Amino acid sequence: MIKYPNVSVKIIFKYKNEMLILKHKNGVFDFPGGRIEWGESPISALKRELKEELDYSLKKEPKLFDVWSYISRNNRRHSIFIYYLNRLSKKPNFSSPERNEIIWLTKRDTELMNIIKNKKFLNKVFEH
């Protein structure tokens, strides 16, 4: 029985026709961000996670992009993902204190690497 869902906040950084993806040391590809801690607002969590993962200080609140809810087949895990979108006018030189690989990908790159399996979501990312 699920008591509380895990809630994560993520950001999609876009520069021209590319988006930023992190490749974690365990091989998992993901957008920057992470879990919201108890009592933390989504934006506060996003600011904390961006500082930890990219040594980046978020100056203004990004645009809410999508919310996705996932319940595992065995009903033991419920996860909610809140996605924000931040269009960049210039490509920043991010660094990763956590030593994740920082990768900028086009839609085609993402499809070839099969990183985002939800094609509707991927299309939405590159339409904006």
Image: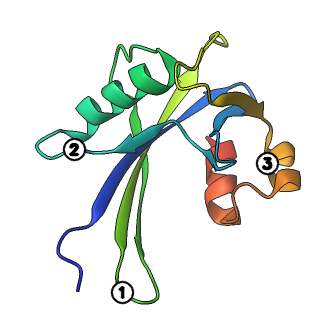
The kind of residue tagged 1 is Asn
Front residue of 89 and 28? 28
- Marking on residue 24: none
Locate the N terminus and report the quarter of the image it occupies. Answer: bottom left
Secondary element at image label 2: loop
Secondary element at image label 1: loop
Horizontally, is 113 left or right of 36 in the view?
Answer: right
What residue sits right under mark 3 in the picture? 110
Query: Counting other residues with Cα less than 10 Å from the Cα at mark 2, is it few (<14), some (14-19), or many (20 or more)?
Result: few
Gap in Å between the C-alphas at discs 1 and 2? Answer: 22 Å
Horizontally, is 121 left or right of 119 in the view?
Answer: left
What residue sits right under mark 1 in the picture? 75
Secondary element at image label 3: helix
Contact flag, marks 2 and 3 (Cβ < 8 Å):
no
Residue 121 falls in which quadrant of the image? bottom right
Contact flag, marks 1 and 2 (Cβ < 8 Å):
no
Q: How far across and down, in percent of the image, does residue 94 sit?
A: 60, 14
- Marking on residue 37: 2
Q: How is the image coloured?
A: rainbow
Gap in Å between the C-alphas at discs 2 and 3? Answer: 30 Å
Q: Residue at left 15%, top 47%? A: 38
Q: Residue at left 44%, top 81%? A: 72
Q: Residue at left 49%, top 26%? A: 53
The kind of residue tagged 3 is Thr
Residue 40 falls in which quadrant of the image? top left
Q: How far across and down, in percent of the image, does residue 30 sit?
A: 59, 46
Q: How far across and down, in percent of the image, does residue 65 sit?
A: 45, 46
Residue 88 falls in which quadrant of the image? top right
Disc with the residue nearer the chain's start (2 vs 3): 2
Disc with the residue nearer the chain's start (3 vs 1): 1
Disc with the residue nearer the chain's start (1 vs 2): 2
Front residue of 96 and 12? 96
